[in-house]
């Protein structure tokens, strides 16, 4: 006979913690605690195999189940010293689902099962609290009817409201035992009316009904959707656990509480939590009385009443023993629920405790120091994404705030400042020492100076990878993007959302980690990056294999990147340098020039400025590798848009307004993302790339870093689709290098490589690697072209995709391993086959996303490059990937 | 000793026609003719191996070459009855290059080699024509100096001009022997002055100099570029052929001429060509005398003088024998050059003759009937692309014309009409029975009605695959796109190009096959599609394996497609139906609707119209498969643009102008190509696809084609990137089908498939084929995303790419086999692995391009679908691919 039922309790169990597949998470956990000798209320788990048999056999129970359940129930009563259905000493049970993977709230639960008109009296006697007994019965009827009998819970709420109205009270707690007895009678009548049958009084009928309903809830629509979203196969099924109820409200020798084995806010090693005498869990939630601390040391300011260590010393001893045992057994900080019924201590649940990032760091470092876990395990314990909280100022959690609107959490950190709608105005005010917050419908490359000047950026449109979001993350500026409810009336100097208005000059605060926008200034807390953070990052650096570089182009970016541990620059965009107010005029002159000669004249003005940019950058990076991408965006991005601007530019550039407008028209593109940009500019206007190569080489000689040797720049050609493009650019670059070597009498060393950011480049990587000395995967554009999705336009429909369950994560945030990832793997393989040891990196936004970093490690890349503020995240993610990879290798070796 | 030299002449040869690799095309051809017993002037070929040895050994000759050349030269003199360097009876020779593949004009040639102050006198005596002798010498000095001595030919032209000026004449032919003798003296002096050495008088010095120079020209920049563009390896090298010169100007028993074995204009089987007594080839070109016909029958109207069959009957007999021999030897119509020197007949060259498409068809069909070639060979002889000439009206080649401007040959055929700038005006005038030519800066989907009404379309912007070009080809309207010099001033009602202006209402003519635009009406000739065309197409249909469908959505398109032999519709776009004047209002109502209810109300108005479209289409196609693509373009394409239009639409749609403008703003996209379109519309607004599915199914039932069974539509979902999208759409479509089956009491059969037009879809094809019942490769979009190139924006830089030698053909015209093609192969393979027998087709513009059709056949696709007017081209290309495939299979079996 198949074993369908696994019992636990009294310090032993038929199951164990590793049997999640059979017993579900909850059942396995209870079995494990019981085996550890902990006082778990006795119970049993019906296996997931029963669930599958139930569905396979048209909702019929498999042979032998009934007998096994009855046997286990009898043993459970014996262990609890109670009897199921016994009016004198009734055993009440809970019936809960428990799948292999946690599916919180997705399936049904029934509590207090076993109550009827007889046992309610017994419970009243035993507890000395008739109100509690009748209230428990009332709740049981409501829950059972809803879950098992399909009677809408609205009916019961109606009866309850009517009773309160009649009595002239407003709180449930104002009803006494007598009132509740009357309500129970009304409930029972209602159930019979709605379901056509009396409410089952036989506890066994109740039990089988509840077990059937809980198994049945595996297939409800809510659970099915959750499974689809989380890739949980239907075939896993759920287990059902039946467990004795215990009550913390049986008198002054009863209590209920929660305990953390370490402080979840600070990570300090101490028992931390609270309890309440003569109470049930829901009383704590109801907030009628204030819970008391477990220990004197853990007493929060203002908490009253005796600490548990004083009030219930014996039971407290049991708690201490249990928590110690659990922490060393699970080797992690535990979050425990317990109940004391008439002086008897019961463990209800234990799980790894949630904690703040700061606390997580301290706990991981401490536990490694205590020898409880290894350093590798310490590294694996920290969610890299969570570090983001530490690297930016955060809102003081205790400060009051007034919500204004919300958008996407586009770039983390909190910032306050005066609302300014115009980027130039923002620059002016910031120069005068004022804190400004730039608010725009959306940003464009021309707004960079204003974004740089602002403390933070708020936009009404654009997704997580819109221009505003990408640039803000790169600069480390907090940003809330795509605040859909926000209406900006720039002319009137106001913005409004949900009927509230804010004028330019008023202070607002944004939280780029949550997407919230507040009126007024909310105080912030600055980050601290020493101590445990530094220790753990040191361990991570020792473990990881991937190098971590930063995407940086300004001296400030480069300095931040180094302070966060960047080992080079993986992407120095050169176009932002073109937008500088001092240069944009020369850039525009170049664009409107009639011929190569005119362009060369304008480029000659830009050359010394570009050169000095690179000199500074090379000096800051002090010999670390620097990858410079030649001009990428289409030229029209540099041209003015409004009539007034056009008039200004025409005057300054010495051309007529009509000539300038014609040029703007000529350069207009339907799909600029797929237009005349990247290497295509280099093909049409080779003199632009030639000037940039010259600026780089001359800077490499100047910034020799004191050792007399020029630095070794890595020159990167964007948007290559075929080898011929790269060949043509490399020839020009090489010619420029030879010319400069001749002029300066120095030898230059440099690499010429390419972005792999088009599907064709990935497929032709073998060919392209014949010329390219390195590849850098531009996964932003590669995602755009592989999916055929413009990231600037995707916000409006990707949200529909998320709602429809078609995607879980934005592919611009976490790399699409199946599609884009296959192209990365193909390119890596073909590239290295053609050029062994070819250096491979990634410089898209994904370089700072932990899941994507893991993919990069698995794909064999040499480095990832990300925004300066994400460098620590990437370092930690890289360490975790290396540790997981080593573990995988060990498994495969076995 | 390696054999470096292969002699030919006197009816025998050491080489043969198959030795192209060693002897080059020219050398092998001469050897072949000589072996056939034809009277080729004697000569010898120095092998390509010498070329390689020459470069490998630092421009030194390999051992033994000198002796072999001298020996061959002596034999050659003997055969010619002359002696190299003999003042009395000099042998003059030509020195020419000849590579394995034809590289016309890329390398150097020297003629009349062997002339010096002594032999010039001999030649004067022998020819009785001192002027000819001195002129030959003069030309030799100029050519030799240019090619061998690097003396710029400008010097010689200067001397010649001076001599004419002094004599007061303007033509070279006005100079007599005396004058030319003086010029020769001046030339010789100039050579010595420029090169520092006297002009070589020793014929052997001349010979080795010329051989070295011709080998040297293999590496000149022109040849290197040509090789790169045509993938000719440098290692192939060139051969050099030295051949006795013969002269047709040695008296009235000498002549020169050309002959075709069949009429190259009509294909008629007859000797066709002309000759000139006492003349050299260049005299024919100079046009001083009119050439005479070869036969009386071939006499052109107005040609004077005796036919060769009368004037030189014996030699004519030799010509007839030679041409007959050559045509049956080469099994193709030959284009022959011959010379008669003092009654002796010489064959100089034979090659397959160029011919008109009409002639090519007749020759192929006739030769197959004669048993000279097989039907497969006949099919292979026709360039599918050339059929395009036959399918459209063409300009009468004899009609006078006035050029106005030119653009790209975007859609073939010629058309004349009044210039109209506004599409609605075009529709109005056309309805009034007038021929109009729509002229636009560029077209958009809103111009469709005007494009349809026009006889032809001319645009100032846009490439071969711009909206105008694609739509025009689909409709079979001639189109010239991207006429860069054209300036349109719509307000003033004029257009201008190159300083010439044309007003609206004036007549112009466009030739969409050449890109030319003419002022006024140029008469055209209508196509004839019976006879040889029909015969050959019948043979092609019997040979091909690929099915050929058409891209068609209007009844007119569908009828044209069937008349051209389409076997179904591979792409019926549904958006063009939305632009119809009667519907656009309801479409716009749907777009501005606030919610699903409003959208459904608008869609209900569109439903009956869509349904009747499909009924008509199904009836025309009479049971042939019809693939219908659900709505693809972003919604903003349907909205108005100008303020006036916006006001009209707002009024009609019952919304405020500001509401409409807001909606237009909301729908604006930065990169519409990568935006909210295709299946993404279906995800956001499922009710749109639901309406379309309903229209299709209801039409399928109505249009049962008389057999009582509904037709089997193929419903195609565009822009799928992941299987989930397709699953969601298929669920809706299936639900709709079930509902209609219930309503109508009929059973529906249909397929649901997808476009594969994104790299991700190609990579995930295995997954997607789990749901898709067919794949149709949308290679337009797949090319855009694989390359990251917007076809609407590509014209401006692809031209630079072509000039730089980076691409040979526009990847939107001929499928990029290496990149896009790999994705097609991957998708085909993975799709069929998941669903054996999965139906695969292509419906991009490439479906009508012969090279791309060949690729589709090789990739194992089931069908291609193209514009109706390209169906015959695809049918023929498919047959050629099948024949080539079968030949490949036979070779591999061996």
Image (tube, coloured by chain):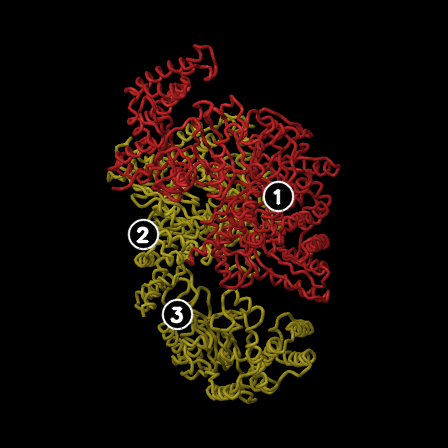
Chain colours: A red, B yellow
Quarter of the figure that contains the C terminus of chain A: bottom left
> Is circle 1 on the same chain as circle 3?
no
Determine crowd level at label 1: few under 14, some 14-19, many 20+ residues with C-alpha closer than 10 A.
Answer: many
Say which label, 2 or 3, has the lower sequence index.
3
Quadrant into which the N terminus of chain A falls = top left
Few, some or many residues within 10 Å of mark 2 (<14, 14–19, 20+)? few
x, y (%) of residue A542? 57, 54
- Which of the 4 quarters of the picture holds residue B316? bottom left
Residue wearing tag 2: B836
Q: CA distance from mark 2 to mark 3?
A: 52 Å
Residues at marks 2 and 3 touching, judged by CB atoms closer than 8 Å: no
Report the number of discs.
Answer: 3
Q: Secondary structure at mark 2?
A: loop
Label 3: which secondary element: loop
Q: Residue furthest front?
A: A314
- Residue at mark 1 to residue at mark 3: CA–CA distance: 72 Å
From the image, tell me which residue sits under label 3: B261
Q: Position of residue A774 (x, y in %)?
A: 56, 59
The residue pinned by badge 1 equals A471
Q: Nearer the viewer, mark 1 or mark 3?
A: 1
Which element carries disc 1, helix, strand or loop? helix
């Amino acid at each position: 006979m198949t074993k369908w039922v696994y019992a636990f309790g009294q310090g032993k169990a038929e199951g164990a913690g590793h049997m999640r597949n059979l017993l579900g998470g909850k059942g396995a956990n209870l079995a494990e605690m019981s085996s550890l000798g902990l006082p778990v209320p006795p119970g049993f788990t019906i296996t997931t195999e029963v669930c599958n048999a139930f569905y396979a056999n048209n909702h019929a129970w498999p042979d032998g189940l009934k007998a096994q359940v009855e046997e286990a129930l009898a043993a459970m009563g014996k262990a609890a010293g109670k009897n199921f259905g016994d009016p004198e000493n009734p055993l009440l049970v809970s019936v809960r689902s428990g799948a292999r993977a946690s599916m919180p709230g997705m399936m049904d639960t029934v509590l207090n099962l076993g109550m009827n008109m007889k046992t309610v009296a017994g419970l009243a006697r035993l507890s000395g609290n008739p109100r509690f007994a009748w209230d428990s019965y009332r709740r049981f009827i409501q829950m059972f009817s809803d879950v098992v009998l399909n009677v809408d819970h609205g009916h019961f709420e109606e009866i309850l409201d009517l009773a309160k109205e009649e009595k002239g009270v407003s709180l449930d707690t104002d009803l006494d035992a007598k009132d509740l007895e009357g309500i129970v009678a009304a409930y029972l009548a209602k159930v019979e009316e709605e379901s056509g049958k009396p409410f089952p009084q036989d506890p066994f009928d109740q039990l089988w009904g509840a077990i059937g309903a809980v198994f049945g809830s595996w297939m409800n629509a809510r659970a099915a959707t959750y499974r689809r979203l989380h890739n949980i196969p239907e075939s896993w099924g759920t287990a059902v656990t039946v467990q004795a109820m215990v009550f913390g409200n049986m008198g002054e020798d009863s209590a209920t509480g929660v305990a953390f084995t370490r402080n979840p806010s600070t990570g300090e090693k101490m028992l931390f939590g609270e309890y309440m005498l003569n109470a049930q869990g829901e009383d704590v939630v109801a907030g009628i009385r204030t819970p008391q601390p477990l220990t004197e040391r853990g007493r929060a300011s203002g908490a009253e009443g005796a600490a548990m260590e004083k009030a219930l010393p014996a039971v407290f001893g049991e708690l201490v023993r249990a928590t110690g045992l659990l922490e060393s057994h699970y080797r992690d900080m535990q979050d425990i629920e317990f109940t004391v019924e008439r002086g008897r201590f019961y463990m209800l649940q234990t799980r790894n405790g949630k904690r703040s990032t700061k606390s997580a760091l301290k706990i991981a470092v401490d536990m490694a120091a205590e020898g409880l876990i290894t350093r590798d395990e310490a590294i694996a314990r920290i969610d890299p994404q969570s570090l983001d909280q530490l690297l930016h100022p955060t809102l003081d959690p205790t400060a009051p705030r007034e919500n204004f609107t919300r958008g996407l959490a586009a770039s983390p950190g909190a910032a306050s400042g005066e609302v300014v709608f115009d980027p130039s105005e923002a620059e002016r005010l910031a120069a005068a020492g004022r804190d400004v917050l730039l608010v725009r419908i959306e940003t464009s490359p021309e707004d960079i100076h204003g974004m740089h000047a602002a403390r933070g950026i708020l936009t009404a449109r654009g997704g997580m990878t819109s221009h505003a979001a990408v640039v803000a993350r790169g600069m480390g500026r907090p940003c809330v993007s795509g605040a859909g409810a926000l209406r900006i009336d720039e002319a009137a100097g106001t913005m409004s959302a949900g009927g509230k208005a804010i004028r330019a000059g008023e202070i607002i605060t944004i939280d780029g980690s949550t997407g919230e926008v507040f009126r007024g200034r909310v105080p912030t807390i600055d980050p601290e990056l020493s101590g445990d953070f530094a220790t753990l990052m040191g361990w991570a650096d020792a473990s990881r294999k991937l190098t971590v570089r930063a995407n940086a182009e300004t001296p400030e970016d480069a300095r931040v990147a180094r302070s966060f541990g960047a080992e080079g620059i993986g992407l120095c965009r050169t176009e932002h340098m073109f937008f500088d107010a001092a240069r944009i005029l020369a850039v525009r002159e170049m664009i409107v020039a009639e011929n190569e000669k005119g362009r060369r004249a304008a480029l000659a003005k830009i050359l010394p400025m570009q050169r000095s940019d690179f000199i500074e950058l090379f000096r800051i990076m002090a010999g670390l590798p620097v990858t410079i991408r030649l001009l990428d965006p289409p030229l029209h991005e540099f041209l003015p848009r409004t009539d007034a601007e056009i008039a200004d530019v025409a005057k300054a550039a010495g051309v007529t307004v009509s000539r300038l407008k014609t040029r703007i028209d000529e350069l207009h593109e339907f799909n600029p993302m797929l237009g005349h940009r990247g290497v295509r500019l280099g093909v049409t206007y080779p003199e632009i790339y030639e000037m940039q190569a010259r600026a780089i080489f001359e800077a490499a000689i100047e910034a020799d870093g004191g050792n007399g040797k020029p630095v070794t720049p890595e020159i990167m050609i964007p948007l290559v689709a075929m080898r011929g493009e790269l060949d043509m650019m490399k020839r020009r670059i090489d010619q420029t290098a030879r010319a400069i070597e001749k002029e300066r009498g120095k030898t230059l060393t440099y690499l010429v490589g390419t972005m792999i950011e088009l599907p064709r480049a990935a497929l032709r990587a073998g060919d392209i690697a014949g010329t390219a000395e390195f590849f850098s995967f531009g996964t932003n554009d590669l995602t755009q072209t592989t999916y055929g999705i413009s990231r600037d336009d995707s916000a409006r429909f990707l949200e529909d995709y998320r709602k429809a369950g078609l995607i879980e994560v934005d592919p611009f945030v976490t790399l699409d391993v199946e599609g884009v990832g296959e192209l990365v793997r193909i390119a890596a393989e073909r590239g290295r086959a053609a050029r062994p040891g070819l250096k491979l990196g990634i410089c898209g936004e994904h370089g700072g996303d932990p899941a994507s970093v893991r993919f990069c490690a698995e794909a064999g890349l040499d480095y990832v490059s990300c925004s300066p503020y994400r460098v620590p995240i990437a370092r930690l993610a890289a360490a975790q990937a290396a540790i997981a990879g080593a573990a995988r290798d060990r498994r495969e070796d076995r």
